[in-house]
Image (spheres, grey):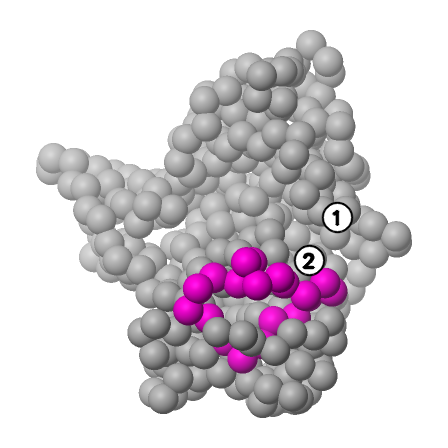
Amino acid sequence: MSTDIVLAGARGHGRWHLDNIRRLQRQGVVRLAGICEPTPLAAPEIPDGLGTPEQSADLGALLDATGARIAVVCTPIPTHTDLALQAARRGVHLLLEKPPAPSYAAFRRMADGVETAGVACQIGFQSLGSHAVPAIRRFLAEGAIGEVLGVGGAGAWARGEAYYRRAPWAGRRRLNGTDVIDGVLTNPLAHAVATGLALLGTARAEDVTGIETELLRANDIESDDTSCVRVRTPRGPVTVAATLCAEEPGEPYVLVHGSTGRITFWYTQDRVLLQRAGHGPQESEYGRTDLLRNLVEHLTAGAELLVPPDATGAFMRVVEAVRTAPDPAPLPAGVWRGLPAERRRIVPGIDGLVAAAADTLALYSELGASWALPKEPNEPREAGSR
């Protein structure tokens, strides 16, 4: 028997969820009972096969009317916590898009509220559903690359002017006095940060002992588009470098460094390359468990939830460090240039710097980038502090 669900936020990235729900509905896993949007979707906006779900701008009322068991929340970042708690208070389980909240305090309020309500909450880091993640962990446990020294992450993407006009909160650190924190490390390339922490086995908030950030921007926005972060943990550092101003955009990846080898994980492709002393390179591709399906199977068959809130606590420490850091520094005009045909800005040389940061676990300033001023370390704050 399929599980009734409601989708809050069906435009923008929500269209991906509509298509995914349609796929799972065809398989008899779920049934879309309702859509929550300020402006109802017109019939052509609803993919074929989803029927005529109820629509409302009021999530609570929609959940009450439909009796849905699961709410998928894919709304603007500042709304995540309140909408999640609306659902939780009604006993409705959650798939909550990443980042789960714009601050650590809001995250704790959400996670504590969900726990008190006794509902399940899955955070939408789809990369953590990859079967490559447990495979890499097995490699590490078997000593395939010797002693693990740390993890690097690299993301070189391109986003143009339209990306920052997609919503009023796009590219903002705050809006009308409310935290947003829509930066490259915390939203578009957040998977690199969360996946790196997960592979190292340091995904919980208490695993973080220190954070250093370098936040910069080439675009005329409030938030950062070219940044790096180093998260210190008892098991080694996780350094992630990311940009939305790449010259030649490529697939993001996470790189596990060992004393006798390395493992590269292209997490959008579920592809892994194992390189180790005394062996030829070994490349593998893996399947992936859909996080909504996993949530349904958790509720109906007792499957282990893949990404509960606590498994994103360390990532949320990074969000908090970005939130409390000084506002991103604008790159000097001579450092970036525009591509009028593509209506975007690039930072010449950034692709190589991003890769070098993942390869050496160094920050931009340590790699000799004259425009990257070193920042003071941001120490983790106590849970719930602001």
Which residues fall within the magenta stretch? 32-50
Tell which residue pokes out farthest to the front in this image: 43
Report the residue marked by disc 1.
Answer: 169
Tell which residue pokes out farthest to the left in this image: 279
Q: Can residue 14 be seen in this snapshot?
A: no
Left or right, residue 102 beside residue 94: right
Left or right, residue 104 beside residue 121: right
Q: CA distance from mark 2 to mark 1?
A: 8 Å
The quadrant of the picture occupied by the N terminus is bottom left
Tell which residue pokes out farthest to the right in this image: 177
Q: What x and y, as percent, mark residue 231?
A: 56, 47
Taking the magenta stretch, the answer to whether it contains residue 343 is no
Q: What x and y, as percent, mark residue 97?
A: 57, 62
Q: Can residue 191 be seen in this snapshot?
A: yes
Left or right, residue 34 beside residue 179: left
* Residue 77 tag number: 2
Dot 1 alpha-carbon crowd within 10 angstroms: few under 14, some 14 to 19, many 20 or more: some
Along the line of sight, which residue is nearer the eye, 125 or 30? 30
Dot 2 alpha-carbon crowd within 10 angstroms: few under 14, some 14 to 19, many 20 or more: many
Q: Are marks 2 and 1 in contact (CB under 8 Å)?
A: yes
Q: Residue at x 52, y 16 (%)?
A: 349
What secondary structure is marked by label 1?
loop
Along the line of sight, which residue is nearer the eye, 189 or 37? 37
Q: Residue at x 50, y 40 (%)?
A: 239
Which amino acid is tagged 2?
A: Ile
What secondary structure is marked by label 2?
helix
Which amino acid is tagged 1?
A: Trp
Q: Residue at x 31, y 74 (%)?
A: 27
The quadrant of the picture occupied by the C terminus is bottom right
Residue 91 image-quadrant placement: bottom right
Q: What x and y, as percent, mark residue 372?
A: 66, 24
